[in-house]
Image (cartoon, helix red, strand yellow):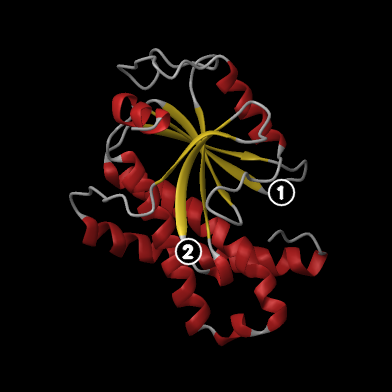
Amino acid sequence: MSTLSNHMSQCCDPRLPGILSFSIKEAYRFLDELTKKETLFLQPEMKKTWGYLRNGLVDVALKQILESSNIEYEIADKTTSKYKNGNTYLMIEAKGAIITPAKVSSAKAIPKKAIYRDKGCVLNKNYNLFDDSDDLNYGYDDESVPFLILTYGGANHELKFVSLGLPDTEMGDWVDIIDITNTPVLLSNPKEVISDLQLTFTEKAEEIMRSGENEEASGTIQS
């Protein structure tokens, strides 16, 4: 068992990897259905919004599925922009880890540098992989909690992999990374979760598309 796998099994909720992978898959599934149903998205200029929409759907899925899972967690959306409606990033604090998602080009790729990721990696400098935790907020603080990055991606907007990685303090390489693409998801009510998520996705997609159209018009949209 790898270092990170051992940590996940010893210190984290065993349902967490499956929940994270399932959330990413559901976001991609909805985006695929949406872009096939709405012919507007097939226009070359509209493809610029796909990345913006995907990132928003991933955040929505992670929040809602974690809430439905009964896993102990806390979530914070933090802005990366000085502007009121600037881009945000998601930080998930669960038992044994702080996690942020990132789209990458390949299964072992390191996400591009960002201030909030760099700051998160500093946490790993003093992190002991063999510490134990009995509670979400006991035994793990800003000096000892491991910072993990949930990476995902694939070519042509198709999901091919989902991974959890422990980056080094310089964000130059992985200390360890594990593939969680096919990790079983443990939910007591998966059909209900998917049904509720579909409604939330639809509402959020409309909001994101309106926002994306405005940002595209102003030249600030991110892919």
Position of residue 124 in the picture relative to residue 11 (left or right): right
Rendered location of residue 216, percent (x, y)? 75, 67
> Which quarter of the figure is the C terminus placed in?
bottom right
Name the residue furthest left.
Answer: 188
Name the residue furthest bottom.
Answer: 39
When the figure is inspected, residue 40 is found, relative to residue 217, above or below; the finding is below
Depth check: give the residue in front, 197 or 144. 144
Which class describes the residues within 10 Å of circle 2: few (<14), some (14-19), or many (20+)? some
Rendered location of residue 139, percent (x, y)? 40, 12
Q: Which of marks 1 and 2 is in front?
A: 2
- Residue depicted at 51% across the width and 17% down the height: 127
Q: Name the residue under label 1.
A: 86
Whether the residues at callouts 1 and 2 have beta carbons within 8 Å, the answer is no
Position of residue 180 in the picture relative to residue 32 (left or right): left
Position of residue 190 in the picture relative to residue 46 (left or right): left
Position of residue 158 in the picture relative to residue 216 (left or right): left
| Residue 207 placement: quadrant | bottom right
When the figure is inspected, residue 142 is found, relative to residue 64, above or below; the finding is above
Name the residue furthest right.
Answer: 219
Gap in angstroms between the C-alphas marked 1 and 2? 26 Å
Rendered location of residue 8, percent (x, y)? 35, 31
- Residue depicted at 69% across the width and 45% down the height: 112
- Disc 2 secondary structure class: loop
Q: What residue type is labelled 1?
A: Gly
Any mark on residue 159, and which? 2
- Count of numbered labels shown in the rendering: 2
Q: What residue type is labelled 2?
A: Leu
- Disc 1 secondary structure class: loop
Rendered location of residue 203, percent (x, y)? 47, 65
Depth check: give the residue in front, 149 or 57. 149
- Residue depicted at 63% across the width and 61% down the height: 52
